Every structure is written in structure tokens, then in C-alpha cells.
Amino acid sequence: MSAILTLNAGSSSLKFGVYQVAEEPGLLLKGQVENLGPLARMKLQGGEAWDIGPADHAVALHEILKAIEPALDGRVVMGVGHRIVHGGKTYGDPLILTEEILAKLRTLEPLAPLHQPHNLAAVYAAQKEFPESVQIACFDTSFHRHHPFVNDTYALPYKYYEQGVRRYGFHGLSYDYITSCLRRDWPELYKGRVVVAHLGNGASMCAIKGGQSVSSTMGFSALDGLPMGTRCGQLDPGVILYFMAQGMDANEISNMLYNDSGLKGLSGISHDMRTLLESEDPHAAQAIDYYVFRIKRELGALSTVMGGLDGLVFSGGIGEHAAPIRARVVGEMEFMGLSLNAEANAAGETRIGTGPVEVLVIPTDEERVIARAVADALLV
Ligand SMILES: Nc1ncnc2c1ncn2[C@@H]1O[C@H](COP(=O)(O)OP(=O)(O)O)[C@@H](O)[C@H]1O
Ligand SMILES: CC(=O)OP(=O)(O)O
Ligand SMILES: [Mg+2]
């Protein structure tokens, strides 16, 4: 008997899935270590959750390997699928990792410092733990690889585009999953113009037309676009020049933009939307206002790119669970044909709009997209 393991290192979590090998992989166990930092928690799908104390990605992986043993129940892990956040301009489709490819992926670490090093560390750990398994990379950038040039470039000297300074876009495994749900359950909408808002600790939005990514709010790195838990989102590059002129070096600037900005930096309270929504501090309200403002701005821009909007889908930790954020976005975009069914939104239903633009909440499942890719590789 054999099994598939999936590992998905996000910026605040390490998510995993264990599946039976099949064309449509059969789920055996799913869970995550969330809130990485001093107070991390292990959570298994279906309820069980426990504190594991301080945990970085390495400790989380160790805990996960312990937690999956009963689910494996003697099955041999034949394939481990990894979310690899950055594939650069070379890598798109899922592939079996070799030392040579891993070396190339390591060169992309500076472009995604909150993810890529942890993604690759998980590959080495899995190779050691399951020596008979193949390691499959599934790239977060892949869904966006076919953007039209105008959505793929910056207005820099062209040689930098050729060097790979491009708008890659991320959260592609999540968008891929949501698109597969639309194709199955909302076939008319699937053919139309949809904006998906993946609002997790990292956050981006994507314009998807006829099932294809047209434009994403994220670009060269996972910093651009929406403000996030600790990342700044869209920023005038002049601000970076100003910091440099003040004597800050690249590490200091990077640390500020990736770790100390976004909801955390603006509120001075927390990176976690739950804490901000509960807070009465006016700085929490200001950070939420900015968050909602940017989502609305991007929704307008992405709709324009597609020539209109047929549906908006919320996903990711905040998109799936923060009803007040959804209510504000939808309520403040009525002029574009969005309208909220407040009861359905508060009750956590899938369909929360009253039309004419469809508004949906679809929980993402990056693990399933990864598991399908591993099954494809194992069953050839
Ligand atoms: N009930 C909730 N209300 C508001 N925000 C929530 C809620 N549950 C989770 N979140 C937010 O979701 C974030 C985690 O989202 P997730 O997509 O799992 O993260 P990651 O980017 O690490 O994959 C948390 O940081 C938290 O801000
Ligand atoms: C790319 C990215 O920001 O991922 P996550 O939301 O999982 O941190
Ligand atoms: Mg994530």
C-alpha cells in the first residue's frame, strides 16, 4: 500500500495532506501547523487541535511527521508533493525534483524569502524521511505563466524583462483549485470573468477569464499588491530609494517590507485579522480600512482588465472566515453590481451575493492540487 504526502509552507503555516494513491487521490488526513512563531498550534481537519509551543517551519515539519504516522498505517510514502512558491521564468508545470533543479530554485530564494527557503528545506527533509519517495514540485507561479505581455512586464529597460524581472504572480495552486471548483459547480461563471481574492496571511487577487489567469496583483516577488499580515503590498519604489538614502541596507529594508509592514506595521498591534477585528484601538480600524480600500481598488482594476465582472470569489484564511471583511468589500462595491446577502454571509454560506455579480466563498485546497500532480507522476 502506498501514499502521497503534500507539504505547503505558507508564511504563517505549514499545511499537509496524506492521500491514498489514485487518479483522484483519496484523502486520509489533512491538517496544518498554524500561527508559526511563539504560540504555534497543530490542527487536524475535523476538529482536533493542540498547542505545540514555539515552532518555526522545521519544528512544524517534525510535528507533522509524528502526527501522520497513524494515518499512514504502514503505507509507504511513494511521492511527496511540495508547494514551491517561485518557479522563476524556467519552471511551470509540476516536475520531479533533481539536485540540479533544486540548485536553480535556491537562486530564487531572495525573491520569496518567507517561502522558498522553507519550501526547499521541506524537500530535503522529506528525501531523508522517505528515501524511496519521489519529490514533486508544484509551482505557485505556474497558473500565471501565460499572462499577456502587458501584464507580465514592468516599464524597465527591456533587457531586465529578458533577465526574468517579470510579474510572476503567486497563489497559483489556490487559483488552480478554485478554477477547478468553478468548472465543476459553476460552469457558466467558469466561462466568464471572475476575480478571486485569496486573502490569507499572504494575499493576492487574480483576474481569471474563461479559466485562464489574465492578471494578478502580485508581481516579481510576493510583496506587491494587497497589504498582507506583515508585507507592505503596493509601494512606490521611491520610498525604497528614500530608505537607502537614509542609510538603510538591503537586509534592513527587506526585513521591514516582508516582516514588519502590512496589517502588523500599520496597526502596531498584530498581523492577525482576528485580533484586529476584535480590537477597539483606532489603529486596528485604520489598518482594516486600508486593507478593504486596497481590495476594492484592485477589484476595480482587475475587472477593467477583463472588460467587466461576472463573479467575485473569496478564499484564504481571511476570505473564508472574516465575514465583516467580505461584507465591507461587497457592500462598498454595489455600483459595480455586487450586492450582499447579509444572512448568507454571516452564516458562512457559499453563495453570499444577491446579484447581478455572483459572490462566492470557496475554501481553497492547495493540497489537493499538489496531490493530483503527484498522482499523475506516480501513475504514468
Ligand atoms: N475567523 C477568522 N477571522 C479573521 N481572520 C481569520 C480567521 N481565521 C483565520 N484568519 C486569518 O487567516 C490567516 C491565515 O490564512 P492562511 O490562508 O491559512 O495563511 P497562509 O498565508 O499561511 O497560508 C491568519 O493570519 C488570520 O489572519
Ligand atoms: C505567496 C504567498 O504569499 O503565500 P502565503 O499566502 O501562503 O504566505
Ligand atoms: Mg497560504
Image: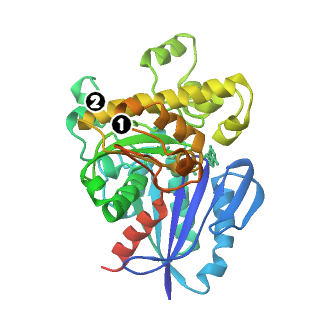
Residue underneath mark 1: 337
Q: Is mark 2 within 8 Å of ligand 2?
A: no
SS assignment at label 2:
helix
Where on the picture, by quarter, is residue 96? bottom left
Where on the picture, by quarter, is residue 259? top right
Q: Quadrant of the C terminus?
A: bottom left
**Residue 194: percent from left, percent from top:** 33, 46
Q: CA distance from mark 1 to mark 2?
A: 40 Å
Is residue 237 visible in the rendered image? The answer is yes
Q: Residue furthest bottom?
A: 1
Q: Residue at x 52, y 41 (%)?
A: 326
Q: Which mark is residue 160?
A: 2
**Residue 261: percent from left, percent from top:** 59, 28
Q: Residue at x 51, y 12 (%)?
A: 242
Q: Is mark 1 within 8 Å of ligand 1?
A: no
Q: Residue at x 53, y 39 (%)?
A: 327
Side of 242 where 190 appears, left or right = left
Side of 160 where 177 appears, left or right = right
**Which residue type does callout 1 highlight?**
Gly
Side of 84 where 303 appears, left or right = left
Nearest the viewer among 302 and 138 is 302
Q: Earlier in the sequence, mark 1 or mark 2?
A: 2
SS assignment at label 1:
loop
**Which residue type does callout 2 highlight?**
Tyr
**Residue 295: percent from left, percent from top:** 46, 33
Nearest the viewer among 210 and 257 is 210
**Residue 173: percent from left, percent from top:** 41, 55
